[in-house]
Image (cartoon, coloured by chain):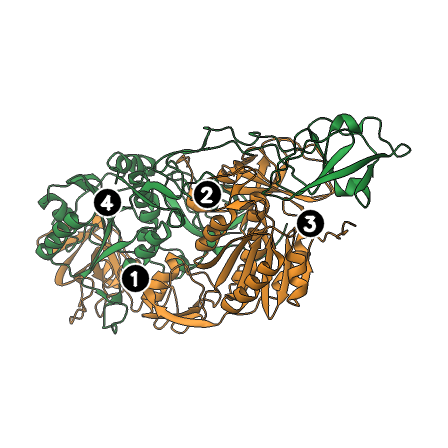
Chain colours: A orange, B green
Amino acid sequence: MMVEIRKPIPVAEAVERVLAHAAPTGTETVPLEESACRILAEPVTASHPVPPFNRSPYDGFAVRSKDTEGASGSNRLPFTVIDEIPAGSVSNQTLGERQAARIMTGAPLPDGADAIVMFEQTVEDGDTFTIRKPFEPLENVSLKGEDLAEGEEVVPAGSYIHAGTVAVLATFGYAHVKIARRPVVGILATGTELVGVGEPLAPGKIRNSNGPMIAAQLRRMGIECRTYGAQADDLDAVIGTVERALTETDALITTGGVSVGDFDYLPAVYEKIGAEVLFNKVAMRPGSVTTVAAGGGKLLFGLSGNPSSCFTGFELFTRPALLKMMGADKLFLPHTKAVLGEDFTKPNPFTRFVRAVYDGNTASPAGFNKSNAVSSIARGNGMIVLPGGTRGFKKGDEVDVLLLGIEEGSTQWKL
Amino acid sequence: MMVEIRKPIPVAEAVERVLAHAAPTGTETVPLEESACRILAEPVTASHPVPPFNRSPYDGFAVRSKDTEGASGSNRLPFTVIDEIPAGSVSNQTLGERQAARIMTGAPLPDGADAIVMFEQTVEDGDTFTIRKPFEPLENVSLKGEDLAEGEEVVPAGSYIHAGTVAVLATFGYAHVKIARRPVVGILATGTELVGVGEPLAPGKIRNSNGPMIAAQLRRMGIECRTYGAQADDLDAVIGTVERALTETDALITTGGVSVGDFDYLPAVYEKIGAEVLFNKVAMRPGSVTTVAAGGGKLLFGLSGNPSSCFTGFELFTRPALLKMMGADKLFLPHTKAVLGEDFTKPNPFTRFVRAVYDGNTASPAGFNKSNAVSSIARGNGMIVLPGGTRGFKKGDEVDVLLLGIEEGSTQWKL
């Protein structure tokens, strides 16, 4: 039997080929409280100016700035308080000469007032107070519309809805929000060596860890999955399951079966169902056998059966494709520069993705580093990227790090 | 009326005071598929070695290394294939001299074999193949236990369960996982100026954006909340609601009412219910009025009514406290160093937290920057930290950046 020779393509080109086949999943409208962690399908615009009126940013006294002219430590000027304005209330008074209104943070200025004197800037005595400095027109005033003008676009369509976005949606009365429909993603783990999590191990067997792992990777994106279970290495059975999955999902992820082994059936499956193989070899480690095909307008992600390869293939190819299907404007993992914590002297023609612990400065390998390593996948919060075709890397070199998740947080408050 | 003078404390000290009062919420056990994004309450240990047996990391042939001695391009050595071992199967053959077994990735080596020859390293002819180089003992073999020994701790208690953790849990048969119970958190927005998201605005009013925002900040941590609605500035009503909330929740977040205004009732509420105020002034902007109290063994977070202040107060104080309640080992936001994208020449005695867009290198302010800014809160993925007591900062200075969420991702694949 001849071994098929596959031509590896660069990671960036593989990403582009996948994205070119990512079709939109459409939109839906949900209540505001369900919109967090989704992708905006329409821009958020300011339904009113922010602030909506000239308001006080402090607790203090609203005054007419012209009445404060000439105030000094040796010439304290007195004011009489004629009204009190809690936040949420509107004064019906108009300030006259040397009159003031007690005003709370967020309350609108009364007619006539154009400056705010903070409590700390006064000496109070009953219904009067004195000041020792003059105030400019609009001093200490939050101006109507200074933050946002009415009708201004605040957040563009395609944005991820984080907590700050929710605040903006609430501010402008978006009780319902138009968002991207989440794709339905199927997961099918292949391989006769796989047993379920709750099953006992037999000689030669391992538990299916890729299925639950991918479900968690999807969940982090807010996407639920449909599991097709671990599948034995049986060509006809796999074809049947893949065909059914494609009718029930927007995209299908398989694990295993994409290499050049005798029981690696996915290439035959793609051929049988008429799917176009976009690539079947990427110049990366781990995960070089990652294969992506497109059929019936849907993407089929053929991830490697090795856990680290599978994880990396998902983050590099599946994640951006699913985000593009949802119309997201930021498709890729955030990244930063870091100081490499260990030597990587072995030259490698392929780009390496090394599971790493990034501490805000240094990135060090998370542990034992082979594509089948289970231990390193459990540790670390990033992936060091070591470009291929180089002569190796030294401890202390500057490297790129992909950030995998901030949920992990940091152990120290170092600031 | 005298204005209360409050003594500001440093952010780090405020964090410590809060954490000292964060009590554990206990544990629960859930199915593996529900454990993602939660905090491990017990360590994960390897229930078997990884790999569980000496196995092939490639598709190829298992051979006896001693049979390969002397192989070269001019002295190709022939082998006879006597068995085929798919992944998940165990061979019942023992290799004799110059015998080999065809073996798939992940399959256990047959008796007698101690090296793997990759397909690419052979020339095949029917049931035989030849090789042109010798193989060392254990060459191309994944050794039993090389990744993890049986009984080894793989992930410590207190770890955040990410996708990689799920893979490890699955590998070792954790069909159920003991995790931290999530705290029940109450949200109470105070202020007569507040109207609900779905209600029309009236003069002097604004919509309650802090409540939905905090709900989203909690949701990002996997924590559901109990909303006590926007509450008018009525002391007795607030006391009643706070007392009820403390019987129904593990922690209570209020927004507004913590400043020194006439209707800032929270200080009076804390006094009335006998809660100890841990601090009521922090040397930070925005959010200097952030107040935290402890009463009945529970934390009461008195966040500012200004959206940016409220957001910052939650991330700096509430988030680490809730994580500590869940036994997490990483309580703080991850951070990195960045190049400041703009001048901040105005000296400030307080530490500033500036909502920012961090692109992997430069951190620039996300927009209009006052504590009441709604627009900046909708933008950006980090917070620049500018320590207080300095003479200001210049564009190009190195600064710390707190990373708020990787879900936002990056627009470019730049690696």
Pinpoint the chain carrying mark 2: B
Q: Which residue is mark 1?
A: B209
Q: Are marks 4 and 3 in contact (CB under 8 Å)?
A: no
Q: Secondary structure at mark 4?
A: strand
**What residue do we see at 46% from left, 59% from top?**
A225
**What residue do we see at 64% from left, 37% from top?**
B91
Q: Are marks 4 and 2 in contact (CB under 8 Å)?
A: no
Q: Which residue is mark 3?
A: A262
Q: Secondary structure at mark 1?
A: loop
* Residue A177 spot, x, y in % from top left: 37, 70
Q: Give whichever of discs 4 and 2 has the lower sequence position.
A: 2
What kind of residue is marked 2?
A: Ala
What kind of residue is marked 3?
A: Asp
Q: Give whichever of discs 2 and 1 has the lower sequence position.
A: 2
* Vertical placement of residue A104 versus B179, above or below: below
* Residue B198 spot, x, y in % from top left: 27, 71
The CA distance from mark 4 to mark 1 is 19 Å
The CA distance from mark 4 to mark 3 is 66 Å
Q: Which residue is mark 4?
A: B291
What kind of residue is marked 1?
A: Ser
Foreground: disc 4 or disc 3: 3
Pinpoint the chain carrying mark 3: A
Q: Residue furthest right?
A: B74
* Residue B301 spot, x, y in % from top left: 24, 46
Foreground: disc 2 or disc 1: 2
Foreground: disc 4 or disc 2: 2
